[in-house]
């Protein structure tokens, strides 16, 4: 099993990658290849050209940026999982990356590819929504940035235009007073999320200053349950308060259903995993 | 249209022209006749095709040869040194960590990467570390024991 023919170009810089994408119709960026190559081998995708960005070193790495942390698009899941900066300041992301697929997948898969591919079963989209991350992109008209909550537009569709390269993801450091949790019900073979829940809870003594909850796997685009977070802000975020906030405010329209799990089942999973993730985030904030 | 690549495999540098759609596993098996790297599922799940690229375990069925340009690849053929089996190979042998042997090259190369990162893994860490490698024969029990034995002997 191997892909259909394509023209291969290796970009030495982001500018060159953008120029190549602009010049070649039906071209795709190649990063780690761990979402793109499997679908090309199955001939579900037959791009005319691949623009390999794998050698653009400036796109790799994790650094402090303004009040948060900037992660280059080509940074692998393994690097994110091992990053001491992220483990200390944004453990939600490093924890979630540590649970992607398996070690080989984490050695090649990149954060940029993970979100550009926008597979509903991917782990990182909900995490980035819960964190309030921002996505950096470069195109022929220059650079632009969008909030993670505006990035995902439909099943496998994003804000990225055909001639744009995703360059980085900016995440805020999680406050000292906050805790976070990512929990998933995973597919036993691939590790992909059938339902994943990401939660960040910021505490002010005994009361909840803010809460953010988002889901993977349940809907075509990751679902940010803003109303659940709003209902918990100002509460004591007890187990009862969490259960009540989810019961009253978690509204999931058009859940995905497939051979692994029906839509109804995924909604039930979201309630349970959402509750547990909020509880764990709260407990981590207190400890 | 061919693409020139320069890939070091088991210490020998190979310069070849490859069709860009050639998968690394086919480059190794067909162009270099290194058939120790197996093709199992072809769908990135079984890990039989695992090799080390610059020391990191990678499924070579999900990698183009052109992506490995400029890297150093280790296959199962490259593990033994001067006729001496690698400690993980010895441990798989002694603990009966294989039956048909099909998954073994991938298991061992993944375990090499695991022990480099974590020289003293717990049984659970070994299981997590070998999550991307499927064995149809052994029930995994002896595979875990083999990796533990190699770790105890300081295999990395
Ligand atoms: C067996 C297996 C199990 C997996 N399990 C999980 C899992 O449990 N959880 C999970 O989240 N993921 C999982 N994945 C997916 C993995 O995380 C992928 O690596 C990731 O989704 C894609 O990253 P990549 O660098 O390999 O992208 P590629 O495959 O190279 O690209 C994917 C898509 O994104 C585009 N793209 C990539 N980078 C950019 C960029 N910088 N700018 C613009 N477009 C870009 C490409 O054109 C392509 O359309 C699994 C994959 C495999 C093979
Ligand atoms: S053959 Fe590559 S993972 Fe199965
Ligand atoms: S020993 Fe036969 S597949 Fe593992």
Image: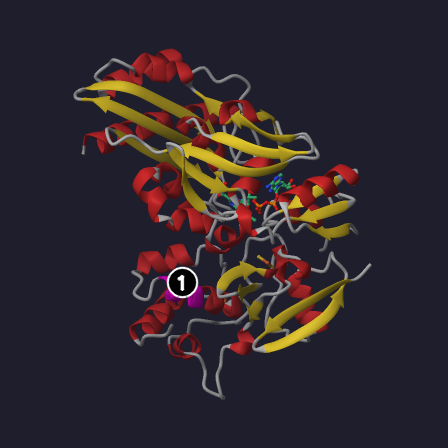
Q: Secondary structure at mark 1?
A: helix
Predominant SS along the magenta part: helix
Residue located 70% across and 47% down the image: A51
Could one spot residue A89 in this view of the protein?
yes
Could one spot residue A186 in this view of the protein?
no
Left or right of B24, for residue A3: right
Above or below: residue B99 compared with residue A163 = below
Q: Which residues are magenta?
A: B111-117
Q: Position of residue A64 (x, y in %)?
A: 39, 40
Asked if residue B116 lies in the magenta stretch, the reply is yes
Above or below: residue B50 compared with residue B35 = above
Q: Nearer the viewer, residue A33 or B136?
A: A33
Q: Nearer the viewer, residue A91 or A61?
A: A61
Asked if residue A124 lies in the magenta stretch, the reply is no
Q: Position of residue A215 (x, y in %)?
A: 45, 27
Question: Which residue corresponds to mark 1?
Answer: B114
* Structural crowding at the residue carrying mark 1, measured as other residues with C-alpha within 10 Å and reported as few (<14), some (14–19) or many (≥20): many
Q: Chain of mark 1?
A: B
Residue located 55% across and 40% down the image: A112
Above or below: residue B88 compared with residue A77 = below
Q: Position of residue B23 (x, y in %)?
A: 68, 60
The image quarter containing residue A182 is top left
**Quarter that holds the N terminus of chain A:** bottom right
């Amino acid at each position: 099993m191997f892909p259909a023919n394509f023209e291969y170009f290796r970009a030495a810089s982001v500018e060159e990658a953008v120029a190549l994408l602009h010049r070649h119709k039906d071209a795709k960026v190649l990063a780690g290849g761990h979402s793109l190559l499997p679908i090309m081998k199955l001939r579900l995708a037959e791009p005319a050209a691949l623009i390999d960005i794998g050698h653009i070193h400036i796109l790799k790495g994790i650094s402090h940026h303004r009040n948060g942390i900037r992660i280059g698009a080509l940074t692998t899941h393994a690097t994110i999982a091992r990053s001491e900066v992220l483990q200390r300041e944004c453990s939600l992301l490093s924890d979630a990356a540590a649970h992607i697929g398996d070690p080989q997948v984490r050695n090649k898969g990149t954060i940029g590819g993970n979100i550009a591919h926008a597979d509903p079963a991917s782990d990182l989209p909900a995490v980035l929504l819960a964190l309030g991350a921002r996505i950096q992109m470069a195109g022929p008209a220059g650079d632009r940035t969008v909030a993670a909550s505006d990035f995902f537009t439909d099943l496998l569709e994003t804000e990225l235009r055909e001639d744009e390269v995703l360059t980085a993801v900016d995440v805020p450091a999680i406050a000292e007073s906050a805790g976070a949790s990512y929990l998933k019900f995973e597919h036993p073979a691939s590790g992909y999320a059938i339902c994943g829940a990401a939660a960040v809870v910021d505490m002010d003594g005994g009361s909840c200053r803010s809460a953010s909850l988002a889901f993977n796997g349940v809907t075509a685009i990751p679902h940010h349950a803003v109303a659940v977070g709003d209902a918990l802000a100002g509460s004591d975020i007890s187990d009862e308060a969490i259960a009540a906030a989810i019961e009253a405010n978690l509204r999931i329209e058009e859940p995905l259903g497939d051979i692994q799990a029906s839509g109804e089942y995924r909604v039930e999973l979201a309630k349970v995993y959402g509750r547990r993730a909020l509880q764990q985030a709260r407990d981590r904030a207190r400890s | 249209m061919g693409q020139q690549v320069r890939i070091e495999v088991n210490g020998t540098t190979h310069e070849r022209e490859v069709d860009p759609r050639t998968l690394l596993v086919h480059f190794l098996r067909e162009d270099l006749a290194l058939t120790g790297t197996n093709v199992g599922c072809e769908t990135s799940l079984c890990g039989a095709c695992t090799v080390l690229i610059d020391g990191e375990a990678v499924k070579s069925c999900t990698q183009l040869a052109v992506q490995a340009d400029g890297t150093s690849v280790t296959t199962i053929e490259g593990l033994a040194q001067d006729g001496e089996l690698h400690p993980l190979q010895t441990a798989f042998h002694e603990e009966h960590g294989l039956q048909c042997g099909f998954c073994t090259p991938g298991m061992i190369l993944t375990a090499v990467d695991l022990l480099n990162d974590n020289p003293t893994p717990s049984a659970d860490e070994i299981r997590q570390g070998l999550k991307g490698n499927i064995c149809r024969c052994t029930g995994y029990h002896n595979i875990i024991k083999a990796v533990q034995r190699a770790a105890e002997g300081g295999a990395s």
